[in-house]
Amino acid sequence: MQRNLPSTSSVDSFLDTGANQHVTPDLATLTASKPYLGNDNLHVGDGKGLPISHLDHKKIYTPHRSFTLSNVLHVPTITKPLLSIQKFCLDNNVYFEFHPRVFYVKDLNTHEILLSGQSKDGLYALTKSSVTLVPQAYWSPCTSASANLWHRRLGHPTTRIFQLFISKNKIICNYKRLNFQCQSCPLGKSSRLSLGPTGHKTSDPLELIFSDVWGPAPLFSSDGYRYFVIFVDAYTKYVWYYPLVAKSDVYSIFHQFQTLVERQFSLKIKSVQTD
């Protein structure tokens, strides 16, 4: 389908999941290009082979870090500059996250937002503002909510920290007085649970193992888990934590745990208590 694309005057590259190379029609964007002496052409959607004129490597510098664009092809007859998403991710250890009106480039390990940009006319474009402005946290400045709701969203901050968010216009909050009605805060600050004596004493490791399974979480973790199981040794108080994709994985995980601890302590598990 033929469509009118936005002007490239403020666009560095259009993000393209179908491209396996970075391409530009503008030789001026390549500072140390070398003439391409090979016989390969760039093949586009209609099957045409477009001649490659030059080849270069580029760097994108941002307040966070620099990014590498390896093997950028100068193709004078290409219509628009294209950035290969797959090649960019491999070269820079990042991933893209697309939303209806915005996209983010995030670090693959820390998930920190490194670049951000907006869509225009149905296309996602990497612009100069994307690489010069420090991306802000993902929040909507036009959405106002109650103090209690923001308190839960932000991970139960103290009143002083919460007032700092408001004073710096990081959130829009409907409130008259900050009086959080939160049951989680006192529990999170407790140093120990109030448990009575059980009357059962252990004299060796692995004599009694407590276990419990939690889940499902309302959202998947970054690694795709929604459950976890813990094992607690009653004698040593050691805790072992295992994330789970499905609740049915508990049986196989227990065997892994059993092999690990029995080899570590040179003892056998005598009993397991769970709910």
Image: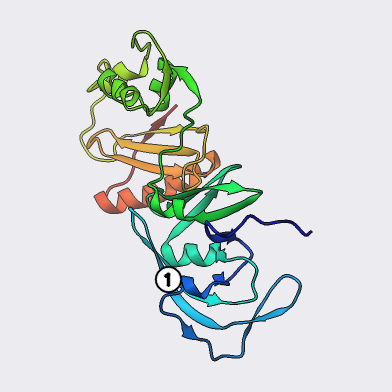
Instruction: List x then y, in percent, for residue 135.
Output: 41, 45
**2 relative to 93 in the view: left or right:** right
Q: Report the residue at 60% width, 77% height from top.
A: 76
Residue ID at (62%, 65%): 80
Position of the C terminus by quadrant? top left
Whole-percent x, y for residue 91 in the image? 44, 67
What is the x, y in percent for residue 272?
Answer: 38, 35
Q: Is residue 110 above or below residue 18?
A: above
| Element assignment for label 1 | strand
**Nearer-the-camera pick, 222 or 265:** 222
Q: Quadrant of residue 172?
A: top left
Q: Nearer the viewer, residue 116 or 33?
A: 33
- Is 217 positioned to the left or the right of 123 in the image? left
Residue at image position (48%, 62%) is 89
Q: Give, as a three-letter code, the residue at label 1.
A: Lys
Above or below, 5 relative to 40: above
Q: Could you tell me if residue 199 is visible in this image?
A: no
Viewer-proximal residue, 259 or 145?
145
- Is 93 drawn above or below residue 195 in the view shown? below
Per the image, the residue denoted by label 1 is: 58
Q: Residues within 10 Å of mark 1 (few under 14, many from 20)?
A: some
**Residue situated furthest right in the rendering:** 1
Image quarter for residue 271?
top left
Q: Nearer the viewer, residue 222 or 13?
A: 13
- Examine the image and state in which quarter residue 62 appears: bottom left
Residue 122 in percent (x, y) is at 66, 49
Q: In the drawing, does residue 215 fall left or right of residue 170?
A: right
Q: Residue at x 42, y 26 (%)?
A: 153
Asked if residue 51 can be seen in this view, the reply is: yes
Tag count: 1
Q: Quadrant of the N terminus?
A: bottom right
Above or below 154: residue 242: below
